[in-house]
Amino acid sequence: MTFAEEYARARGDVLAELERTLASVDPAQLERLRDDILRADQVFFVGVGRVMLALQCVCKRLAHLGIRAHYVGEITEPAIKKDDLLIVGSGSGGSLFPLGIAKKARAAADCTIVHIGSNPNSEMKDIANYMVRLPVRTKWYLEDEIDSCQPMTSLFEQSVLLLGDVLAKMIIEERNLDMKALWQYHANLE
């Protein structure tokens, strides 16, 4: 097999997994998340590792849409309030830092908390208002998780990023935003 053939096969495998995963998301959960994002005064994101990086991309994209979006831990992070939304990304739902931040947000502001993850029976279920489930393989290898040919939880992180971009597109359409006008929110000190 040539390198080009290997690449085509690997690319097809990854894209097929992403299609299967995104197609498995409950549209009602996603609609609720979109509505909560649009209703919130500010939207906060928290995760760790590669999930954190994917969520930072989603956070930045929402900021490009004129939404007041923040990543927990950023130097200019404001206080979270009752009218805000916290989006917690954790495939397993048991990552220490996101779980701790969700508990803190519940106690400090009693804001809306959404868990984007794979494990519906994690400790997050008792903290989050609801879950947007990406039922992909986690470190727990739950029976109903979508298996992956990729290492560790790559499929989860990729799906978080793409789900955020799908939501951004839907928000643009919902608000009938002019794509050219969005550049006013893009960084210009680059």
Image: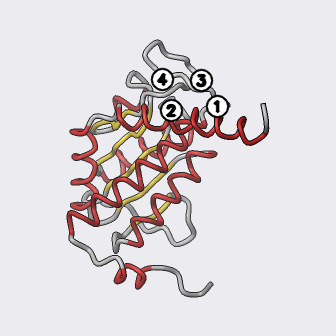
**Left or right placement of residue 7 versus residue 57 in this view:** right
Image quarter of the C terminus: bottom right
Q: Which residue is mark 1?
A: 150
Residue at x 50% of width, y 53% of height: 55
**Left or right placement of residue 93 versus residue 27 in this view:** right
Image quarter of the N terminus: top right
Q: Distance of mark 1 from mark 2, alpha carbons?
A: 9 Å
| Tag 3 secondary structure | loop
Q: Nearer the viewer, mark 3 or mark 2?
A: 2
Residue contact between numbered discs 1 and 2, judged by CB atoms under 8 Å: yes
Residue contact between numbered discs 4 and 2, judged by CB atoms under 8 Å: yes
Q: Distance of mark 1 from mark 3, alpha carbons?
A: 13 Å
Q: Which residue is mark 4?
A: 146
Give the colouring mode of the picture: secondary structure
Residue at x 49% of width, y 60% of height: 71
Q: Nearer the viewer, mark 1 or mark 3?
A: 1
Examine the rendered structure and indicate whether residue 172 appears above or below residue 26: below
How busy is the neighbourhood of tag 2: few (under 14 within 10 Å), some, or many (20 plus)? some
Q: Which residue is mark 3?
A: 139
Q: Distance of mark 3 from mark 4, alpha carbons?
A: 12 Å
| Tag 4 secondary structure | loop
How busy is the neighbourhood of tag 4: few (under 14 within 10 Å), some, or many (20 plus)? some
Q: Distance of mark 1 from mark 4, alpha carbons?
A: 12 Å
Q: Looking at the image, is mark 4 or mark 2 earlier in the sequence?
A: 2
Identity, as a three-letter code, of the amino acid under mark 3:
Lys
What is the quadrant of residue 173 in the picture?
A: bottom left
Measured from the top left, where is residue 59 in percent x and y?
A: 45, 61
Q: Which residue is mark 2?
A: 17
Task: Name the foreground residue: 12 vs 139.
Answer: 12
